[in-house]
Amino acid sequence: MTVKTAPKQAPKSPKRTPRQPPKKRGFLRRYWWAFAAAPFVLLFLLLATLLFVYSRLDLPATPPPLQTTYILDRDGNVLGTFHASVDRTIIPFNQMPETLRDAVIAAEDQGFYNHSGIDPLGIARAAWNDLIAHEVVQGGSTITMQLVKNVYAGHYETDRKTGQTTYVIPPRTFTQKVREALLAMKLERTYTKDEILAKYLNTIYFGHGAYGVEAAAEAYWGIHASELNMIRSATLAGLISNPGLFDPIDHPADARIRRNYVLDRMAALGTITPERAAQLKFQDVRTHPSDGNLSFPAKLGYFLDYTKRDLIAKYGEAQVFGGGLKVTTGLDPRMQVAAEEAVAARLNTPGDPQAAVVAIDPATGEVRAMYGGSNWQKSQVNLATGDGGTGRQAGSAFKPFTLTAAMEDRVSLNSRWYGPGTITIQDPRCYTNGKPWTLSNASDEESGTFSLATATAYSVNTVFAQVASLVGPDAVAEVAHRMGIRSKLQPVCSITLGTQAVTPLEMTNGYATLAARGVRRWATPVHVVRDASGHVLDRTTSGRGKQVLATNDADLVTYALENVIRYGTGTAASIGRPTAGKTGTAQDYVDAWFCGYVPRLATCVWVGYPEGEIPLENVEGYSAVFGGTLPALIWHDFMLKATERMPVQDFTTPSFDGYTVGAPTPPPPPSPSPTEIPTPTPSPTPSPSPTPSPLPSPTESLPPSPTLLPTPSPS
């Protein structure tokens, strides 16, 4: 069967669309290449500019090396040094243990051996944080950049007045950071990586006055840097970012946290295993410091540590430990020896309490002698300055401040006061625990009617409680601060009995104000400070004093305090020349004092146990130690030698006119009015007995007269 198929048809040609006119391309499409190239052109120009600056940039001169600071006595003899010489000891790279290098790189710059001086990612991260904060808050510094900042980025400035040249690190601006980055790149082209790391480890500050790893190892462990182990290396590496916060001596807990962070970073970098890092974390941060940045005989340790603290407060650690200062102090070598010998002669039995002695020149405020403890190597707590909260109750040695406030209120030394053995003060300002204040005298024999002068001589507590109530405890505290007490004082009536903690240094300062007839000169260890070039930075002069008391008020207090030594509680302190002073004994005999002065020297002696709250009983033949016993005897022995080259000088005789508050009414003539205040007569130097003698019963020559305050009923 035949099948017919339809004939094939030719395919139709597609219908052609009419040609459209070409569209005009937009501006951006036409010049896209220019916009794409613009960032590269700007980057090229920026790089060209930086390369031009880089080609012109030279490494600046480095600052002068650290220099030793010398401490001299007033005669020019070297007392000791602050070890700038140790702090600037340069050691070669091969004496820096590998553990230390690894720890520092882990803590400060993990890419140190891979970058060319700058860390672009670190800089970008820091720049972003700075941009958000609108100020420089974070550094992207590599080790090389830190070296540049500390050694090369600053400039020299010369003070026009003193001529002193100092190295100044400029503010941390964005421009300065760019300059430092370029200098870092230049440094990388000039030195090898190991040379840069060695320079860094020889100059970076590790705290405690230690610049460089050699000084740091000596300061914290008394060893050489080559002897550092892994745990100590990590501790030092952790110090670099904040030497004050991560100091293992002052802040061991913070130092341990930072050290463990460094160990974690080392484990992350593979320089130690995680197991080793975990094992090391359990070890405590232990230090075994030597004298570190101090070098001096042990017996002078307390005074030189006091000097160091004073200098650091004024000039900073960097200048004190590396500035090559020449410091002439006010220390008199004869007086210093006299203080040491006076204490040793009276307290020489094992188990005896400690003592502190401070002597100040009232004309300048310079400390002439300081005995802060018997063994600096054993204890660095300076009992003379109150280190470690070692301020002590002054007892009745504080009464001169109350007496001074009374003189300012025009109270007469002849005013008569009833001083029973026990008294209750009803003044609400004197309440204790919401109740009237009741107190007693130290001895039952101290009772009767007294003039204010005689009450001072015999240290009658019940009279001085009334005086404090009269003038106001706030006035007593204010006068004490004005005269030289820096410790915080609560304005309560018991302040007059010395119940609040003060230090021998500030007590001596207060008594020196009386010796200077009301001129306060703050205590200072320094006479003159010179920089490394010999230019004077500071000098103590008598003109620095401030008249804080009326001269006659001060003279009246001195007049009353002379009686303490003539016939009162302080007769053991007599040295055969005009002297004034006051005994002090704290509650339960835990502290005993004698403070006194001649016109040219003020001295305080404290005796007690450093632990505090231990009664001074059965000491050197005394059943109980009062201010008029061992402290007065030590004061006597010291002042006898300290004043042997001083001419005998009288105190200024005060005027009694105008001091009328509470003054007795003189009897009518022809009956003569006996002299209330005993006429000064020189008394020979006593030969103290090993056991204290009881005070004589006070008697008054004046007939009974109305008391200044209502007579209280003994309770």
Image (tube, rainbow, N blue to C red):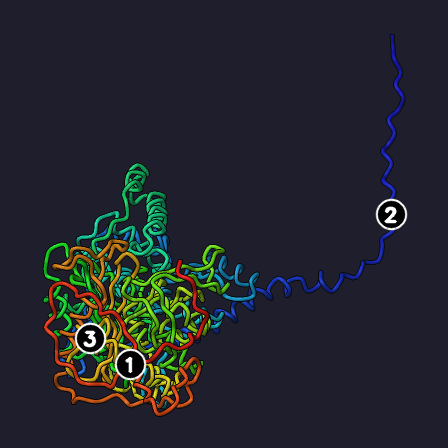
Q: Identify whether 675 is placed above or below 123.
A: below
Q: Identify whether 12 is placed above or below 398.
A: above
| Residue labelled with disc 1 | 365
Badge 1 amino acid: Gly
Q: CA distance from mark 2 to mark 1?
A: 111 Å
Q: Are marks 1 and 3 in contact (CB under 8 Å)?
A: no
| Residue labelled with disc 3 | 369
Report helix, strand or loop for mark 1.
loop
Q: Are marks 2 and 1 in contact (CB under 8 Å)?
A: no
Q: CA distance from mark 2 to mark 3?
A: 115 Å
> Which quadrant of the structure image shows residue 528?
bottom left
In this image, 608 relative to 54: left or right?
A: left
> Which quadrant of the structure image shows residue 134?
bottom right
Badge 2 amino acid: Thr
**Residue 472 place in picture, x, y as percent:** 46, 71
Write the residue at 39% across / 84% down. 549
**Residue 276 place in picture, x, y as percent:** 28, 39
